[in-house]
Structures are given as structure tokens and as C-alpha cells.
Image: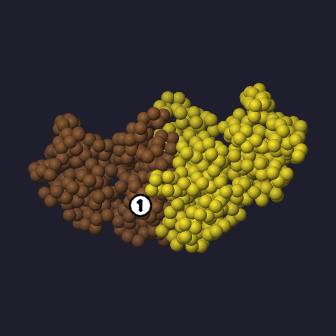
Chain colours: A brown, B yellow
Amino acid sequence: MKDLKLAIVGATGLVGMSVIKVLEEKKLPIKSYSLFASKKSAGQKISILGKEYVVEELNENSFDSGFDYAIFSAGGDVSKKYAPIAAQKGCIVVDNSSTFRMDNNVPLVVPEVNFEDCYSHNGIIANPNCSTIQAMLPLKALDDKYKIKRIVYSTYQAVSGAGKSALDDLANRDNSKPLKKFPYPIFNNCLPHIDIFLDNGYTKEEMKMINETRKILHRPDLKITATTVRVPVSNSHSESINVEFEKQYELQDLIQTLKDFPNIIVQDDIKNNIYPMPINATGHDEVFVGRIRRDESVESGVNLWVVADNIRKGAASNAVQIIEKLINENY
Amino acid sequence: MKDLKLAIVGATGLVGMSVIKVLEEKKLPIKSYSLFASKKSAGQKISILGKEYVVEELNENSFDSGFDYAIFSAGGDVSKKYAPIAAQKGCIVVDNSSTFRMDNNVPLVVPEVNFEDCYSHNGIIANPNCSTIQAMLPLKALDDKYKIKRIVYSTYQAVSGAGKSALDDLANRDNSKPLKKFPYPIFNNCLPHIDIFLDNGYTKEEMKMINETRKILHRPDLKITATTVRVPVSNSHSESINVEFEKQYELQDLIQTLKDFPNIIVQDDIKNNIYPMPINATGHDEVFVGRIRRDESVESGVNLWVVADNIRKGAASNAVQIIEKLINENY
């Protein structure tokens, strides 16, 4: 096997740091790492598996030395400029930003759901939005078996999804400091506002959930609506997902279908107060599904409560899992 | 006008204290108050409009002195035992517990929505569940105009709805003390579990929303599903409400219909980041509605974000508004 080289762009951010943690856990057969960030963070020293790396400032020549893979988590502008440069130099980029997600030439991949889409990449593979990723595992399982007719998403999204400055706003409990990230306090509050507002009255986050779900499930006309909300939880997104099916189902079969799907953990024992919660999901790569119950308001429908670590499975782990599968397949 | 006498049962609880506050603000033409609570709280002194009252222990003879009205906020067991006694002695009881809500002989009333149901009372009028009350104002407005076909509720409910001990659990941020109310920490967490679990997999809170909505809107067969969730917010419930209509609508007409309804405040100016939030709703009796946007996944549907003070409009203020209207009508 050749000596694999991986670049981590945005290595000092919340997602970048989590990428490094997940890489250390997975011990992929990678020979060397290079860490890139903005000028501000250049010079920082970060250890990976006992070896120290110095963070370098990203520039147009950063990829000249030849990387096999890169994980970008430095925001849309950095991805837009540098991901094509890296790809052009033969590196396979897994990009965490939203820049390329809806590009027809870029696969949008959750490994458990549509890894085969990677095979048509042109150098860039997009990592979906955090709130989309965790929904895809149960919805793919159920779409394959019962054919989904319509989805109504309502999300309860953690603050870490908005970065370090957002966590500072959450910690600013007495509102004594100026807010860094949010337009209003998030501590003790709910903000029905994630990413920017669009002309149709939806937020960009809501449209990401709608459009990315359609692309990942290969259901371009799937009927979906979404309300995305930030809640005062530091980490792990929760989602109330109402799903209507074309086909009938038996509840026990549906639960078994979810249990059989890779990396889903069904936590649904209400007699013993077992259900998914953010405090339990944090630190894990699995998607936790519970409160599974028939929706009697439609002919065939179900309500789900889906929780996952938005920084790990919602970003870092999903990206590393893509790289891991690519390596395993010598791709 | 005769000298009106009002009894407040559960005067020392969160809702009881809010009832007193709302009564002081509204300055109803009530001549005298009597405050009742459990033995534990008896003897406490509470001032109403400058006059001091001593809290008495509730017993079977408490209503012998003849009250015109009573507001009960002392839990289901107290209501079950004492509300019929009070009613039998000629007092009109407005009951905050869930005990009588689905009783066919008891009206379930949101004053702006179905006050006329009060006229068929048999001594007891039920105050609906907090999460139901705030949804009823916009949904009544829209049902009258566009006929609702189906509702999908996802709630973001504040901790105050579970009482003082629940607020202690929220304040227990480092989890250093034993939990008093919840099975798991609520600080930094979301609990998809409000009230007890029922055999159908739903919580009692979810079934309250479904059944009470049908009763209040006089739509016994209305298709509704609900997921109710506790979030780490001290006060004011938020709700993501997805509504499907029989009839078509124009968005501006729908927004105007909401604006024209009593005690709804539309906060929906996304260009200026104006939308309802718990921190702004607390202390008010109105229901705040925003994020109003067409749901393109059905022929005629809308998404709403609805926030209100669960202790005031969701309990105390709604009860006092019922009494106020009864007094105004000499009823």
C-alpha cells in the first residue's frame, strides 16, 4: 500500500479538532498529515497519534506536495477557493461546507446511505449538513422498505453547530457580554433562525435539509418541509421527524428495519424512560432513534425522535468515514 | 353589582402566584379573596392589591362561606376531590388540572376561541393544557377561514410548566444535586418526555394536545399528531406547527387573518430578524406567531412558529380571562 497523505484544512476549528480526534480513534493507515488554517492560527502545534504537527497557513501552493485526501472544514469561502485547487492536483477532497453540496458534479454522501455515489466524484465529495446527515440513516432505511411520501422536519439544534463563538454566546448566561454569533441570546431561549433567511421565507438551513435529503435519497421530487430551531444545548442535534409512507407497515417490522441499519441505535423503551437525548449522544458516531410511534393522522405514518452528535456524525466522523471507505477500497 | 368572592386554590404554586399577579394587573371587581393551599403552605401571608391574606389549608368545608368563583391550580388530585364540592356549593370553578378537561359535561375554554362553551357549564370550566392553549388562537383563526385538514405539532416546552422543583433541576447546572422532578438532567439537554407514557407510545402531554385541540375547535375528527419535548428554557413554550388546509389561501390574507384575531401578535419580519422567542414572550398574555411560510409539500399548507408564556396565557391568564368574561357578562 502506498504511503497515504491527508491534509486537514481548518484544523483548529471545532470540526477540524473533532476530525483529528476521530482520526486518532480510527487509526487509518495514513502515513502523514498536514494541518492548514488561517494566518491567525498558523504556528499552533497539534499532536496526532503522538506526533507533533505545526499548523500552516493555507495558500495556493499548499497542495503542491501531493495529497491523497483532504478534509475541508474552514467555511464556504475557503472551500470555494481552495478545494478545486486541491482536486486539480489529484487530491480527493471531502468538503464540510455547503458550497458544492447541490452541484450536480459533486456527490453528497452519507457512507451508510449512498457511498456508491462517491464513485462518480470529480475530485470533490461533499459532506452533507449536520441536521441532514443524522436524518438520512433512519429515512434511508424506511424509504427502501416503505417508500416515503412526505417528511415534516422540526429540529432542536445544538449550539456547537455554529462554532466556538456560538458556544461563547451560550456560556454568556447573564448576558453581560456582547453576543459574538447570534442576533439574540441563546441561553434560556430558542431561536427559530439558523443560517440566513431566503426570499421564500425559509432559512438556508431549512432549504438545505429539504434539498440535501432529496439528493442523498435520490428522490428529487420527495415532498418535504422543515422548521429548524437552535436550542440552548451545547452539543448534539435532536429532530422530531414526521414521515408519511406510500406502503403500509407493521410497527415491529419498522423498528426492526431501523435496528438492522448500520450505525443506527434504537433507544425506545418508554416503560423504562429510554429514549434518545443530546447528553447521551455526545461523543458517539451512531444515530439514536426513539419515540417510534404510529401517526394515526395519515394512512401510513410514523413519528421519530432522532439524536446524534452534530460535530461527530454530523460533520467530522461522517467525513472521516468517507475517507476510511475510500482507503479500504483503494480508491 | 353584588360583592364578588373568589377562591384561589393552590395559591402558593407557580401558577397560583401568577394568578394573583394577573388578578392584580386586571383589577377585576372582586370584593374579597380567599387563598387555599396544602397544610405545608398554610399560614403563609400573601398580599393582593395591598391587602394581606393568610393562606388557609384546604378542606371539605372551605367553600361553605359561599364563593362566586374559584381558580384551582393545585394538581389533579385536589381538583378531583374539591372542585365538585365547590361547584355543588354554587361556586363556578375554573380548573387548571387535566382532570375534567375531556369530560363531556365540562367546557374546555380558551376565551378568544370558544368562550360561548362556558354557558353550558355545570359548575366546572376546564382550563386547557398550556401547550394546547397557545396553539388554539392561530389555529381557530385559520380553521374558520381555511378549514384545517391536519396538524403536526412539535413542541419546545419550558421547564416552568413542570413546577418549581423542575426549575430547581434546570438550575442544577453541574448536576451536583439529585434531580427533583425529571428522570434526567434538563440543563443542556432535551427530554422527549412530558407527563407519563401511554400504551399507544404517546405521552399524555401529546394526547392532551390532540384531544383538547379537537374539543376546543369542535372538530372531533380532526387529524392531528404531536411530539412534545422539554427544552432547557425556564419559561414560555415554543411550538413548530405544520398545518394542512382544505381550502387554498393567499399568504398575505392568512397573515392578516392571524393579525385580526384577538390577542395574537404577528412577529414575522425576517429581514430584520423579527420572530417569536421565549425571552420576549415571557410576562405577556398574547400569543406570538411568526415564521409564517407556505408548506410546498402539500396542496395547501403552512408552517407556523408559535410562542407564549406558558404560566400566564398557558395557565393563569387564561383562567383569569375566563373569570373576567363571566363577571363582565354577570354570569
The residue sitting at 28% across, 67% down in the picture is: A104
Residue bearing mark 1: A198
Q: Amino acid at mark 1?
A: Leu
Across and down, in percent, residue A203 comes to: 43, 58
Across and down, in percent, residue A262 comes to: 36, 55
Relative height, residue B179 to residue B264 (above, below)? above
**Viewer-closest of B323 and A210:** B323
* Left or right of A293 in this view: A23: left
Relative height, residue B139 to residue B123 (above, below)? below
Which chain hosts label 1? A
* Left or right of A85 in this view: B20: right
Counting labels gives 1
Relative height, residue B241 to residue B56 (above, below)? below
The residue sitting at 54% across, 31% down in the picture is: B178
**Viewer-closest of A233 and A79:** A79
Residue at the front extreme, as displayed = B272
* Left or right of A232 in this view: A2: left
Across and down, in percent, residue B284 comes to: 62, 45
Q: Secondary structure at mark 1?
A: loop
